[in-house]
Each structure stands twice: as structure tokens, then as C-alpha cells.
Amino acid sequence: MTDFETVIRSRRVVTPEGVAPAAVGVRDGRIEAVAGPGARWSAREEVDLGDTALLPGAVDLGTGVYDPGLEAADCYREAGAAALRGGVTTLVVSPAPARPAVICADDLQAQRRAAAGSPVGLYFLGGVTSGSGSLDLADLRAAGAVAFQCSLSDGGAPDMAALDDAWLRKAMAELAALDAVLLVHAEDARELGTPPLTAEQRPPRAERRGLERVISAARSVGTRTHVVPFTAAECAALLSAAGSIGVGLSAQTCPHYLCLPAEVLDPESPAHACRPPLRSDANRKALWSALLEPGSAITTVSSGHLPAHGLYTLRWSLSALWTAARRRGAGLDLLSRWTAAAPAELLGLAGKGRIAPGCDADLVAFAPERPVSVPGVDRSPYAGRGLVGEVGPVWVAGMRAPSGDSGPPHTWA
């Protein structure tokens, strides 16, 4: 009788204890054991990655899946395939834009049916609007919404319009009672220009004003709140100070805000669709400083994938983030913390984001020194760029993803 279905060995396995040589034993879709590289186990399949690292699959928080022109089921299949190619094994789907937007339990069930063919794990965020009542939010939570999302401006969609302060406080109070996290697009609508908006009409002060409103509301009702996305580095001190007054506030940024300064963008780049916009190179460098600060309140980094706005970022986000992070001395442990462990912890997804016994066997082979060239015709903001860090075989719940979904063929056993 074999000990495991699959054993994966690597000289660089990222576990909660750090990066070290290890063997990982998988059975029934879960990690059953993590031991030293010389562990003598029998398995139906054994994979030796050598120097290629083994990472926990990324948990992409707030992924936009809806792609105009595609049927809902195709949206999920396309996003899932892109996720696997980029080392993402779990999508936490934004409630909007979607058809229908997820603002009630029936909407969530409709999206879940459409997503049945997705090749990756899926969780859903519930949308909060000025029409969301306590029963709507409770029903969404009971139906499986792992957290909730709202906007103070146009970060969602027409069916998730901006919340004013009264509705923000009301929603926060309801979600505190449900012990649920609220994700907030924090640009203040009153600080924005008249649509259609240019980058100059979405200044950093819109984030500052919105952040002040979020802190004030969260301080009153005690709701755990996560600002998504956080881009204006000048607001980092304000974000950090929230903890000192007892506000459970954290934030997420995206690789394109950390990698692509506004000054170098091609006029036709899809990155111009980012909301908030990409900011200056000085802001980008300061954002890195804030992210790398010990105890930073910027805890998660996710793709910002939003096909409805022309942002196709899932495929390259992990490599882009690593390319910039390694230049600043960050290691694979931090990369996995930002992209896998922290988002899983935020949402209470106990089986996700870690390589440890009892966790789901969502695993990614990652060659951190291998150069990657993004095709010039790629739809992402990284088109034509040279990156470092190649995603190799990917396992979801212990099953190796088909090579067609995880990029070009690889030479690993």
C-alpha cells in the first residue's frame, strides 16, 4: 500500500516556518505530511522539482471575472485558466461587475452555477449597496459569501453605486454583527472629476478623503475593514495610524501599482483603465517602502484582474511582483505571504494559502531565477516586458492541472 498519492520534493519549499528543503505528501486532495527532503515515502507519483521552488497556490482577492461578450460560464473558465498559468489556485470573486451583480443570495447562487466548470477554487464576495438590508446581508453570508465589498465612488458598477457615510456606517454595523470583513474601494466620489475621468481627475487626495471616512466609520462600529486597492503612498501613515486607535484596518495593493509608473505607460496601454490610476514613479517607490515596512498594514497583494475594464492581469501578476520584490531583497516567503497566506487568513480560509499538514494541496512550482518574456501582443499591462520567475506545474486539490492550463510544457519530472 502506498503512503501517498503524490509526493513532491524541492530544495525550496515555502512553509509557515520559512523556505527549506522538504518533501510534501498529498492524499485525497490535502497535504498530509511535510518532512525533510530525505523522507522515505512510497507514492503513486513522485515529483522532484530540484531547485525549483514549491509555493502555496495564490489566493487572488477581489478578482473581476465578468468579461463582456462571454457567457458567464466562459468567463469563469477563462479566468480560471489564466489564474492557473499565473500560479493562482483560488479566486475570491468580486461582486461587480458581474451579471447579475452579487447583492443577494439568489445572485450568489446564479454565479455559483455559472462557475461550476472553473478549474480553480472559488469563493464569492457579497456586494453592499444603499439598498442592502440586514436580511440581505445575512442571507448572503448564509449562502456562502466569505466577505463583503462596497465602494465610495465608481469602483464597482452601476448596480453597486457609491455609499454615503450613513449607509457605510449602517452596513458596517450589520457586518460587525455577522463577524464579516468589509472590502472598500475608498476613493471618495466627491473628490473625483466628472466622468469620463482622467488620471488627473482621480488624485491621491480622493483616497485620503475616502480613507478618513472609512476610519471614522470603522472606529464607530468596530468592523474589520480592508481597503482595496490601496495606491496612494502618501496615505500610508494614515493607514498605519488606524491601528493605534483601535481600528481593524488593513489594505491590499496590486502588482501593477508596484511595477508600472505612470510616466512610462504607452498611450494605448490597458493600464490606463486602472481605478485608482497608476501613479508616479516616486509614489511607486514609496508604496514599496510602505509594503516592506515591518508590521505594514498593507497585508495582501492581488492581481486586480478586471476584464470588464480591459485589465487582464492574472497571468503575469505573480512573476511581475516577484521581479520587483527580489530587487528589493524580498524572499519567496514574503511573496507567498502577500499572495497566499495573508488573504486566506483575512477571510478565514483555514485550508488555503499554506503548505502545512491539513491544508488543501493547492501547490505551485515556481522557478524564481528563470526569465520570462511577455509577448508583445499580450492583453496585459506587462506586454513586451521581461520578467523573472516562471510558473511551472500547478496542483489544485492535489490534482495536477493540465499543461494547457498551466502554461508551456516544462521539463520537471
Image (cartoon, rainbow, N blue to C red):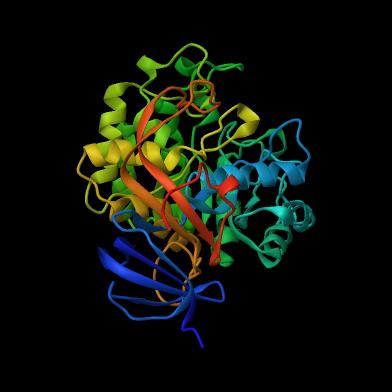
Q: Position of residue 375 (x, y in %)?
A: 48, 25
Residue 107 vs residue 380: left or right?
A: right
Q: Position of residue 87 (x, y in %)?
A: 47, 49
Q: Residue at x 40, y 27 (%)?
A: 205
**In front of the other: 227 or 372:** 372
Q: Position of residue 294 (x, y in %)?
A: 22, 51
Residue 309 vs residue 256: left or right?
A: right
Q: Quadrant of residue 12?
A: bottom left
Q: Residue at x 56, y 33 (%)?
A: 312
In the depicted structure, whether residue 255 falls above or below residue 365: above
Residue 324 vs residue 272: left or right?
A: left
**In front of the other: 172 or 255:** 255
Q: Quadrant of residue 155?
A: top right
Residue 253 visible in the current orientation: no
**In front of the other: 282 or 16:** 16
Q: Residue furthest bottom?
A: 1
Residue 354 vs residue 111: left or right?
A: left
- Quadrant for the C terminus in the image: bottom left
Q: Residue at x 72, y 44 (%)?
A: 101
